[in-house]
Amino acid sequence: MAQKISLTRYLVEQQRVDGLIPSQLRLLLEVVARACKSISQAVNKGALGGVLGTADSENVQGEVQKKLDIIANEVLIEANEWGGHLAAMASEEMEGIYVVPNRYPQGEYLLLFDPLDGSSNIDVNVSIGTIFSVLKKPDDHPGVTEQDFLQAGRQQVAAGYCIYGPQTTLVLTVGDGVAMFTLDREQGSFVLVQEHVTIPADTREFAINMSNMRHWDTPVRRYIDECLAGKEGPRGKDFNMRWIASMVADVHRILTRGGIFMYPWDKREPDKPGKLRLMYEANPMGWLVEQAGGAATNGRQRILDIQPGKLHERVSVILGSKNEVERVTGYHQG
Ligand code: AHG
Ligand code: MN
Ligand code: MN
């Protein structure tokens, strides 16, 4: 059997052979992976660990927090604050940025995360995940502010997610394609299971929350109507549908076998650009998908080119198989 390649070895080789990642970034990614391992343990214990159910609190987006939202957030902060690789962190579960305390050295990177994605699936034992995005702190001034985080997604230096499903798998890009690592629980380490992940350009599978159909805008409605018309319709083929309500799980399926995922702007809250968050959901997922040969837009613009105006900015998301994403985006321009 071929030798197993651990995440550590993969990162060392990316650093040494390809010069793609400096040592601070390598440390950062190792620490994020370690935190994900410990979140995975908590997720696996479920009721036995007393981690299910809601906490008595709301986050800045007005969502009721689950116990695991808070636990995962704390795990990521505690793991990352002392290593000297970070200047600050930002999370779905924290209103402002978390600056690395003075007692630790300050590093060059900024880490953003959705500590627990798919919270509505925690208690029903369905796949959930952690999403992360890494930026470089601008080096033209000392200290760190929220403004430093407001960089377009194309500036990311690393991005990924860890899915807690039947397997725990970490999916990563540092700008050289997408690689997947599955947690070997006996060894306690992430092992490379796939490199050069590629999303097929065409698909017959879409993911959208159909219960919102009556609120959609015309281009999205048109696209889905055409899919639903199947073989007899303008697309001349039948489509299948999946909606897991964990972006991590939907994106993981798309990276594995193709598909298109949409959480578009809709008329329920017309002033909000969308439900999903740009900086720690759409940007890292958008980059992963692009790195695997797919596309990601908000219907009008490439996600990675959007200049964020605030930390918790929301965005309309259309991502996945390239030809389908281009089709929906084209419908918006028509
Ligand atoms: P989070 O649990 O981090 O708030 O994210 C949930 C997101 C995303 O993962 C998923 O695609 C979507 O919300 C599901 O929304 P609906 O329940 O509206 O379908
Ligand atoms: Mn999320
Ligand atoms: Mn979340």
Image: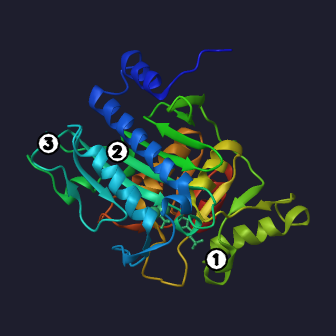
Query: Which numbered mark, 1 or 2, is in the foreground of this view?
Result: 2
Give amino acid for label 1: Thr
* Rendered location of residue 304, percent (x, y): 43, 51
Tag 1 or tag 3, which sits nearer the N-term? 3
Q: Mark 1 points at which residue?
A: 218
Q: Can you tell which of label 3 and label 1 is closer to the viewer? A: 3
Q: In this view, does 213 lie above or below 185?
A: below
Position of 147 with respect to 183 (left or right) is left
Distance in Å between CA atoms under marks 2 and 3: 19 Å
* Label 2 Cα crowd, 10 Å radius (few <14 / some 14-19 / many 20+): many
Q: In this orientation, which residue lies closer to the viewer: 276 or 54?
A: 54
Name the residue: 61% across, 83% down.
215
Q: Where is residue 237 in the image (x, y as percent from the top left)?
A: 86, 57
With respect to residue 97, does 264 lie above or below?
A: below
Return the residue at label 2.
134
Residue type at mark 3: give it. Answer: Tyr
Category of crowding for the residue at label 1, using alpha-carbon neighbours closer than 10 angstroms: few (below 14), some (14–19), many (at least 20): few
Please indicate, yes or no, whether residue 306 appears anywhere in the rendered image: no
The secondary structure type at the circle numbered 3 is loop
Residue at mark 3? 104
State how far apart marks 3 and 1 are (Cα): 52 Å
Q: Residue at x 84, y 69 (%)?
A: 229
Q: Which of marks 2 and 3 is in front?
A: 3
Amino acid type of the residue that numbered disc 2 sits on in the rendered structure: Val
